[in-house]
Each structure stands twice: as C-alpha cells, then as structure tokens.
Image: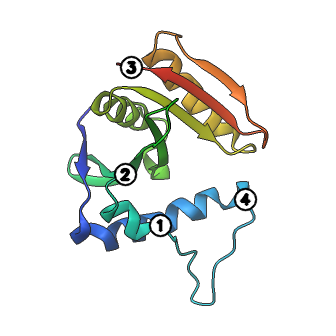
Amino acid sequence: MDMNLEKIDETKRQVLENLLEYYVYEFSPYLDIDVNEEGKYGFALVDEYVTDPQYSSYFIKHNEHLIGFVIVKELNDQDFNFCIEQFFILKKYNGKGFGKKAATEAFNLYKGKWQITQTETNYPAQAFWRSVIKEYTNNQFSEFYDDKRRSVQRFENS
C-alpha cells in the first residue's frame, strides 16, 4: 500500500481549509453544525494548524493523490504528550487500510503518552480508533468515557 504523510506548511493552508470543509460535512451528523451564508462550514483553527508549533499537520497521500489529513497536537499536560486533534480520510478511501496506516505512522513520529478522544455519538470513529490502538499497542491501552460521554483511549509508545 503506497501511502505517506506529507507535512503541511503555510503555503498549503488553502488546501487544508478545502479538505476541512469535507471533514466537517462528514462530521455534521454527529454534531449540530450548519453551513454559513456562503454555503461553507468554515473552520476556526485553520491558521493555527499550519502556524502554531503545538500542531503538526500532515496530508495523507496515496500514489501522490491527496486522500486526507492528520493533525497531531502536542499537549502541555503533565499526563499526556500528544493527541490526534483531527483525522480525516476521504470516503472513497475508507475501509482500505489507509486510515490505519496513517494513524500508525503519526504515532510512530511522536513518542510519548497519547490520548485519543472521539465524539460521544461517532460510533464509527470509536470503533476505528479502538481497533487501531488495540493493534498498535498489542492491547496495552486504557479506555474510558469522559464526563461528556466521549470515548477516550490512552497509551504510551516511548
């Protein structure tokens, strides 16, 4: 499977913003999100994702085709070092192993204590992350529901 992560810099900001529209569209059934008067969802953190050093943003590519993105956030938390801030694979590529491979590569880039959280009603995402993390850690992770009923997995890969 030819898949790689490509670092996103400020010159690719607009491409990330375009992909975030598809991401929010696919995410909209799980949250109460509507488009604005211009017919866009908009995404407040686009600039931070490409300029703020606490974020590391990557395009996910397959045979040089753009198929998604992963955004890792470095946490200023004594208990955890990293989280997946945003993760998206275009629907055409779902279920083909690209998401699993991209998540694994992202984990391998950043060693430490991870916390991954999914929205309380996004059961497909919960199943995906549970499966990926279970395999990645050889079932050495913890999972719980937080006070908002979001599914949370924690593991360490140092």
Q: Quadrant of residue 119?
A: top right
Residue pointed to by mark 3: 157
Q: CA distance from mark 3 to mark 4?
A: 31 Å
Residue at (57% x, 89% y) in the render: 38
Q: CA distance from mark 2 to mark 1?
A: 12 Å
Give the mark, 4 or 2, whose residue is nearer the N terminus: 4
Q: Tell which tag, 3 or 4, sits nearer the viewer.
A: 3
Residue pointed to by mark 1: 45
Residue type beneath disc 1:
Leu
The reply to whether discs 2 and 1 touch (Cβ–Cβ < 8 Å) is no
Label 4 environment density (alpha carbons within 10 Å; few <14, some 14–19, many ≥20): few
Q: Secondary structure at mark 2?
A: loop
Q: CA distance from mark 1 to mark 4?
A: 17 Å
Residue type beneath disc 2:
Gln
Location of the N terminus by quadrant is: top left
Residue pointed to by mark 4: 31
145 displayed left or right of 72: right
Residue pointed to by mark 2: 54
108 displayed left or right of 122: left
